[in-house]
Amino acid sequence: MIDFILGHYVYWAIIALLIIGLYGMIFKNNLAKKLIGMTIFQVAIIMFYVASASKWAATVPVLDTALGAAEAAKYISPLQHCLMLTAIVVGVATSGVAFALVISIFRTYKTLTESVLLERMKSS
Amino acid sequence: MTAVETYSSILPFYAVAVSLVAVPLILLSARHANLREFWTIAASLVKFGVVFLLLPGVLAGRVAGFTLWEISPGIALALKADPFGVFFALIASGLWILTSVYSIGYVRGLEEHKQTRYFASFAVCLSATMGIAFAANLLTFIIFYETLTIATYPLVIHKETKGAIAAGRKYLIYTLTAGLLLIAATAWTYRITGSLDFKAGGMFGGASFSPEAVTVLFLLFLGGVGVKAAIMPLHSWLPTAMVAPTPVSALLHAVAVVKSGVFGVVRIVGFVFGPELLHRFGLNGLLAILAGATIILASLLAFRQDNLKFRLAYSTVGHLSYIVLGAALLSPASLTGSLLHIANHATMKITLFFCAGAIYVKYHKENVSELDGIGRAMPWTMGAFTLGAIGLAGVPPMNGFVSKWQLGLGSLQAGEIAPLAVLVLSGLLNIGYFAPIVYRAFLKKGAGSRGEASPAMVLPIVVTAVLSVLLGLNPDLFFHFYSMAASISGSILGGSGP
Amino acid sequence: MIINNSPALAPLLLLAAAISIPVLALLSKRLAYLTAIATSLVATAVSVLNLWRVWESGPLRYHFGGWTPPIGIEYVVDPLSAFVALVVNAVALVVLWHAMGLADEEIAGRAVPYYSLVLLLLCGANGMILTGDLFNLYVFLEIFSLACYGLIGIGEKQAAVASFRYLIMGTVGASFYLLGLGFIYIVTGSLNMADLRNILPLVYGNPAITAGLTLIVVGMGIKMAIFPLHGWLPDAYTYAPSTTSALIAPLGTKVAAYVIIRVLFYVFDAGYVSGALPMTDFIAWLAAIGIIYGSVLAIAQNEMKRMLAYSSVAQIGYIGLGIGMANPFGFIGAVLHIVNHAFMKGTLFLVAANLRKNSGHSDIARLDAAYRKKLPWSMAAFTLAALSMIGLPPTAGFFSKWYLALAAVDKGNWVFLAVILVSSLLNAVYFFRILERVYLLPPPAGEKEGEGFPLKSKTGAGLGLGEEKWGLMIPACVLSFCLLLLGIGNAGIVKGVIQRIIPIGM
């Protein structure tokens, strides 16, 4: 049991990050903090993939002249890393769009606090 | 039973399509009233002609079929001019000619607004009615049935007063709900039988049912067609819809819409469920009770109406249930009488509605209590009214007597006395609520002004009244209604046929 | 040669055009607009070509870069994806045509980036539909979503907030998808849909697979706006500029629905998701609740776009119900409703756009018969679309309900049957409210009604352009006329496309 918990420490950490991210998105009042929450959530998932790629006693997936190409088991899986490169780019793009929207909101309503924002939206 | 031969012919399609083609023509001639009216009259004549062309074939036992295209995998949009379909189509299209002439007189007499929308909607309605008459399967039937609902809406709300709009809303709620019940019932039927084609004598073949399931299915179907057939308690849209202009009430609510409803009832009874299935589960008894109750209640309610059109509306509710009662009794004469009453009631009721409209146009009188002396002022109109009234009460030599006699005979054939009593009682009630009108019109002194409404209105009135008399004297005159009714009834009970 | 590359042509061309439009706009704005429309037209033509090729020779598999799957990424064109891609491109083409008439006034100064984003959205949609690789789907999903966020954010004041909310929820959804995909990848080692189909039966009992599937369905469910994950939809559709609403409403949720169908029935087995795992039952019940919820709330709305947004929630419920019933008729009903709803909502939103352009608002309470005179053809298109939404034959909407009703009867679930039919009545309530006002309510004093069906409309004095602007009126009429065609020809679609692709196991 303890072995199970300690052995999977990475995944517990990722779960914690997911929860922090969701908490930020749902319960934080400030739009920028919501974005931070969203980014943490996305990063947690990226970490999940990367963690799933690792192996005991394996090296980075760059061809090592000592090991050679035949010993594929000695390299950690590169596929997840590639997928996550894409996911990181997607995350960056999403943040970009999100911040553009936040700037636009700020320009129109002069606030980033959600409760104040809702009031100003109702009265406008 | 004579063997039935089906042949392919485009005539049923033409019957449906003719007035659809007229619609854009009517819309385009909006600014030229006479041209627009010409299209309507021309379309009605052509439509009647096409249907009439189908008559000889049907009498010889040949059924024209036309499949349009597949509308759902395995089910086609198909038309079939079987005897029942041709029977209904003849009535509807023939009376449309007369209604069109009458409408022209009516709307011009009142200088109604939105005449183009009126005539265009009429054309679509008749197209849908032809589609209902010739529908070869339940899905085609539903498609045209719903189209009829939508096409009649602009006519019901024609006057665009608050009352008219409210009536339209009520009409839609009732009829759209009915359409949904029909869809549910059809989906269920499709699952059981795998085919939706109408078959005389029932389409369920050897399917086994639990009593609850078949009763629910029957009630779903009945709810679906019963709204338009004004079976109580689904009838209350009909009196409310009397706010529509009288020609609309005349054709649609005495001929096309409500007759589509009872047509649907007979289709369900005879061509979907079939006598055997209904007898097995006692469903025809249920239907007979509903019909009988409707007849009596409607006749009683007619007494209380002072507005002439409302009185006629309740009378229609009652008489429609004559047809339903005849179908429910499932005996040769009762079915024949039921079918004949579709035709006879149509001609008589349309006469009465036409008269009511003429009175309104000429003297702006709507209520029975205002009709003193109108018989002296409008002898032709009120003469026709009297003929129609006594016909509905079932007095010879009107055609109403013929169908009533058959219904009574059918009741005895089925071994039931109650329906016979209901018919007799209803006849007395009919006299009860029509007599005061005739009495006031002829035997009381009125305001003194004289003059019939315009010839465009009086002519159709006289034609339908005379037709009622002639059909009473010889039911097979012109259109062989009696022999068709007898043969349809035979095919339903015999379980063979198209 | 180029024909062989047809599966890849649409997304790539759209991407290339999206990037080149801002550059071309430096030369001439007109050139940018024309490029957008031309590319959309070519994409539609390519979709037709794909469908034809699929009919002729069966499913097409296109390997990007020559790498064979499951290592390489492949595009798979089968009847379902070819057909949905065609519908998406066709509706987008018509809406884009309409947008040309509006963009200059509505989103002044930002029309060029608007076109660029629209093409990116289409690129994303086409990619999502055609791809045969689950991660590639995520990439295109995000391309699609980001374009959506941008397009919505361009609108009026509250648009940015609505878009932000959509962004948060949508990113959560896409992230769930990614997480679920991660679980599946870890257990099976493959990302290719066809490959997974072979591998998954070996690991069905694995809780990670169940969790992965659930996450994917929830994630795409947010994008599809199934109740109760629909919270972003009303605001997003209402505050977006009219052209964006007309584009996203017909397409956005449908592509997500397509993905769910793909994953549930073609990657996983239909029998598994409806039998061993009660996933489809769950979806069906949520969808049924959503139908009633959406219809009831639509009745309560005062503004047309908001009403149409809630109506969309209800209509998406139909698609969800069809998916959830997991039998052949349900599948047919769901796919047919994807098509029908795209055309119906497209028409309705285009008419709302015309209303706004003409009178500056689309409030229902302010509609009256004067609008019928100002916008006769638009209101006629609206009427036809409304009749279709209510489900009156022979319009398209009746047939989706017919198949769904058959599916409910097949399943023996009378509650679903009742929901499908009752919602038609609810639809009738909120549509007839508008139709009554437009056709029957006399305008406030001053305007005379006139007679007959106007062929030439008159310019409403001082109220902006009437129906003389053909570019606004014709797209709406084209889409609504297609509803009649789709209805009458639905058996052709069902037999020619959908029945060929009914998932195994149903």
Image (cartoon, coloured by chain):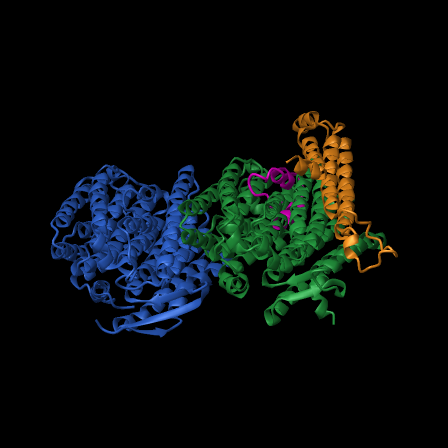
* Residue C39 place in picture, x, y as percent: 73, 59
Q: On the rendered structure, is C369 left or right of A26?
A: left
Quarter-wise, where is residue C189 in the image?
bottom right
- Chain in blue, by letter, is B
| Chain C shade in the render | green
The residue at 78%/41% (across/down) is A96
* Residue B409 place in picture, x, y as percent: 13, 57
Magenta range = C223-251
Q: Is residue B379 visible?
A: no
Relative to the observer, which residue lies in front, C27 or C318? C318
* Residue B397 place in picture, x, y as percent: 14, 57
Q: Is residue C231 magenta?
A: yes
* Residue B344 place in picture, x, y as percent: 23, 57
The residue at 26%/52% (across/down) is B351
The residue at 65%/28% (across/down) is A122
* Image quarter (top left, top right, bottom left or bottom right) of the C terminus of chain A: top right
- Chain in orange, by letter, is A
